[in-house]
Image (spheres, rainbow, N blue to C red):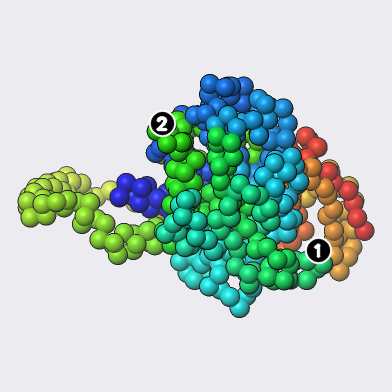
Amino acid sequence: MRHQLWLLTLMLFLPGTILAQNSKVPFENGTHAFRYVLHSFELEARNNLSELNENTIPNTVLIIFGETQILDGDEIPGGLEQFLNNGGAVLIATDRPNQGKWQDIFHVQFDDKFVYTPPERPDLAFKDKEGKVYEACPFVNPLPVDDIPIFRGLKEVATNKPVYFVNGSKELKTLAVFPPECLVDKDGAPTRLSKIGRQAAAFAAAGAIGKGRALVLSDHSVFINEMMIQLDNNNFDFGVECVRWLMKRGEGLEPRTHVLFLDEGEVVTNFNIPIDMTDVPTPPIEVMNRLLAKLEQENFFNRLILGNDPGRVMGNILRVLTIVITTIVAGFGCYRFLHARHRMETSEPLFAMKMAQQSPEVDVMTQRHLTMIKSDNFWEAAHHLSRDWFETVTPGLLAQVAESDGPRSGLISFTVDAGWWRRWSWQRKVKDLWRLAVGLPRKLTAAEFARFVTQLDEVKAAQLRGILQFRNMN
């Protein structure tokens, strides 16, 4: 009940898009739900790799999401293989195909193509509440491995733009594979996984190595908030079972008590969830409606309020409601009685103020600002700010666009010095600014204008730091 209530509550703060991503990791791509799992197991965080030694390794779980370069360096004392031989446990979840020493240790080979489902097989992919199918989010097929019960009872673990790997290890057993009907792009054409090789396309493999344990997954987005905070998949339970299995040690030994968690190469030490809601976006109305409908379907409110003695609790509730409603009605009556007198109308401006607003003495710029505020349309301001900035980074390009047949014939060319995971976000932001600079007029509300200003500042800062580099292209 406690876990379910926590998940339902966080669903309020989950935006609607599945694959969105920003330079500052948005809530839906964060790991708050996974960190809540670590916190629920009372695992203590280690601050860095220097804390690992012969005494601390046996009770430590090392978790790597995304970037895996640290596994091939000298940061781990004695290396990854020695870490496992000394009794440590490791979870490696990544969709990066770069072949490293750690893949040679485990005898696994990652492919560099994303797995997706064919349009004619919507049953193989994750669907949202409205029935929209996300072909880039295929479910995996668990395999019967009795001694590693991570997938026991979990039939709907959904991935998010995963890759696959070929498991050639004798120690690691394949726990789950992608359906053979799924596709990858080979030589520019969609190809079924069943036609690529003799071995199944693996998603998860685990087993004992030395005195330790290892779990390898071909997708770390399976643990982002947007995939775990769902009531119609098993991703949250999957995260729980992964951590539970990694914590276990040999017969008669205490479970592991510490975790060193690296997300995209950065150490994460804050497992104290619930999170600070000031960083969470306001939920859309339809999301709140779905949450309330789900709670009602599960009779959640009645079970939460009435407990084990519904008759007695309901009697107490009715008495309290009677008192509260009577107090509110009496207070409202007093309020209306005390305020039952003529008041000056404040919704309309006074005649003098109205004349001042229409006075020709007010300068044109002020009148334009007042018009924007009154109509709640700040497109003109955003348009000029965007054009001014593009004139500084791409001199003459806007003039070429003006001379062409239309704004779409103008090209903005730039490069992004960042990993592919962030490159898409920067490209989207720059293209949004470009559409404001050369696109057709449209309504831009005050809230959208505020987000535009923040986005423009981020792009300017990225350009100054050399992350974004622009050049003209005819």
Q: Position of residue 196 (x, y in %)?
A: 73, 67
Mark 2 or mark 1: which comes first in sequence? 2
Residues 295 and 177: in front is: 177
Marks 2/1: CA distance? 66 Å
Looking at the rendered structure, the kind of residue marked 2 is Glu
Name the residue at 51% across, 53% down: 226
Residue 12, x across and y down, in percent: 42, 52
Does residue 242 appear to the left or right of 326 in the view shown? right
User: Mark 2: which secondary structure?
Assistant: loop
The answer to whether 179 appears left or right of 389 in the picture is left
> Vertical placement of 194 versus 359: above or below?
below
- At x 42%, y 59%, the residue is 153
For residue 14, say whether it is visible: no
Q: Inspect this view and state whether residue 169 appears.
A: yes
Which quarter of the image is occupied by the C terminus?
A: bottom right
Report which quarter residue 437 is drawn in.
Answer: bottom right
Residue depicted at x 45% and y 48%:
241
Circle 1: residue type:
Pro
Q: Which mark is residue 407?
A: 1
Q: Nearer the viewer, residue 358 or 313?
A: 313
Residue 323: image x %, image y %?
Answer: 9, 47
Up/down of 314 relative to 88, above or below: below
Q: Residue 430: percent from the left, percent from the top?
A: 74, 51
The circle drawn on residue 3 is none
What residue is at 53 percent from the left and 24 percent from the top? 56
Residue 254 is labelled as 2
Q: Between tags 2 and 1, which lies in front? A: 2
